[in-house]
Amino acid sequence: MAYLALYRRYRPTTFSGLIGQEHITKTLVNQINGDKLGHAYLFTGTRGTGKTSCAKIFAKAINCLNPVNGSPCGECEVCKALSDPSNIDVVEIDAASNNGVNEIRDLREKVQYPPVSCKYKVYIVDEVHMLTGPAFNALLKTLEEPPKHAVFILATTEVHKIPATILSRCMRFDFRLIDTERIAKLISEIYDEQGKAYDSEAVFAIAKAGEGSIRDALSVADIAISYNNEKLTYDDVMDILGSSNAQTLIEFVNDVIQSQPGKVLSTIDKLSSSGKSVGVLIKDVTALLRDLIVIKNCENANQILRLPKNRFSIYENIANSTSEERLLRILEIFTDAESSLKYSNHPRVIFETASVKSARPDSDYNIDALMSRIKKLEEQLEKGVKVVEVQKNQEIKIVEEEKEETSVAVQQPQSKTENVLPKQEVEHKVNPSIDKVAVEEIKGKLLFNLRKNGSEMLWNIVQSINIEVVGKVLVLIADKASDQELLDKAPSRMRIEEALEEFLPFELQIKLSDTERTLDAVDKATERVKKIFGDDIVIIK
């Protein structure tokens, strides 16, 4: 006998063998047991989820003489007769190749004849969405009022293409994607029966490749059986799936995260020379980045990913070396690049551009990229310089990690802001958290916490203002009078102080920039002159 593919050999013959569709099988079994059958059913869902198998089981079950828990017994005369492909009581029609109105007219004429050896005559119409408009119209009346002995089962992967008039006349059942764990369990059972040795990670990788489709997963499992006579490993499955070299791919993603654009371009050349298309490369990169994000967020990450221990350890180290915002931004860049491939004649350029852009966050002004840069600055501040003591003569002792204490004399810089501050402030001790050197970090922290706390309006305004520090006074300099007025209100001041709570105590002052004050004064003087002499006489140059 010729070799039979796994998905055909292990096609279920009872409702209990139909994996992951219990919400459907339970309803169908109750209809059979209660003798409450409908005349038209619509099975819809992704490929390889069991629509046709369920239709065949249902066709046998409603005709079986001795059903077992609603499923066909497989032993009675009717079950044996329906197992014969030449049986004419269960008719399978491929609507993809029989989609014309003439074929449906022929079906409409033959449906009037009663079954030969069964109680019901069942028509299974696969890929029914491929029927033409006139064909659907021809089917409509028969589907609405078929003979008592006829049952229609329509199967489709694209239910949105079926006319509403057809949908309203059918009982609709939506087939779900199958859980990866259950597919992996099925493949393990098949391999055990076939005597094939395997690693659990390899089986899980096959199940994951099916993306919820049992047929797709079993097709890969079929190839894996013949790949070698030895134990099936995770790397073997990656080779079968055509994935890029794992080590090179890991180096590439690590170089991107570590901001090494030169190494990134060299690795792209190495990956391209292996013969993989750019589409496959980007798909592999996004899959790896997705794994890193899972590791970054989940405590039981490897229970989800099911990677070999050594590979998971490498992934974990890479994930811990960066922030979640950075990973999300890189993933977004490569996802956009994948979408752009279909419109480009130079896919490698698209890939290289995305890679260099990901490796240079300093030139990326996307909000996620800016947030990751702020996060990195915060981490550097926590791990780097810490001020521990302030003396009256403004000599600050600075302690760095694993270094001896040193004294650095700090000279207070002159600032144009001093003329708006009280004279007694000059005598105050310098607050180590509000130092002139840390102005950019203070603004970054302010922006970060305002956005985190949901103060979007203040966040937008603070982006355009300047910050100056004199002693314990933090001065926010607005370019617009309206911004100054808003920042100077009590609720705004309170939110700003909350955002910079770690730098307390300090005095907060809001002022208008000198340039804006001058322009405002000129505008007011101009208006006064115009009122005195009239708009038609005064000419502004």
Image (cartoon, helix red, strand yellow):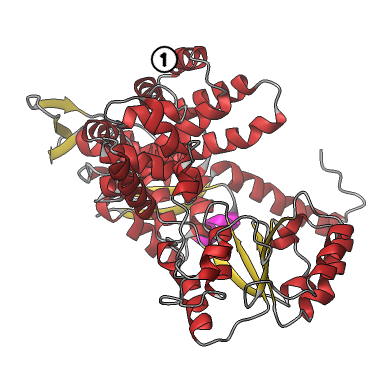
Of helix, strand and loop, which mostly describes the magenta segment? Answer: helix
- Where does the C terminus fall, quadrant-wise? top right
Left or right of residue 356: residue 249:
left
Label count reads 1
* Name of the residue lying farthest toward the right: 536
**Nearest to the observer: residue 130 or residue 539:** 130
For residue 234, which quarter of the picture?
Answer: top left
Q: Name above or below for residue 529 compared with residue 518.
A: below
Q: Which residues are magenta?
A: 481-486
Magenta span contains residue 383:
no
Left or right of residue 351: residue 426:
left
Which residue corresponds to the image point at 48% horizontal and 38% vertical from the top-left?
1
Whole-percent x and y of residue 419?
42, 44
Residue named by callout 1: 263
Which residue corresponds to the image point at 25% horizontal and 51% vertical from the top-left?
300
Whole-percent x and y of residue 30?
48, 82
Whole-percent x and y of residue 464?
54, 45
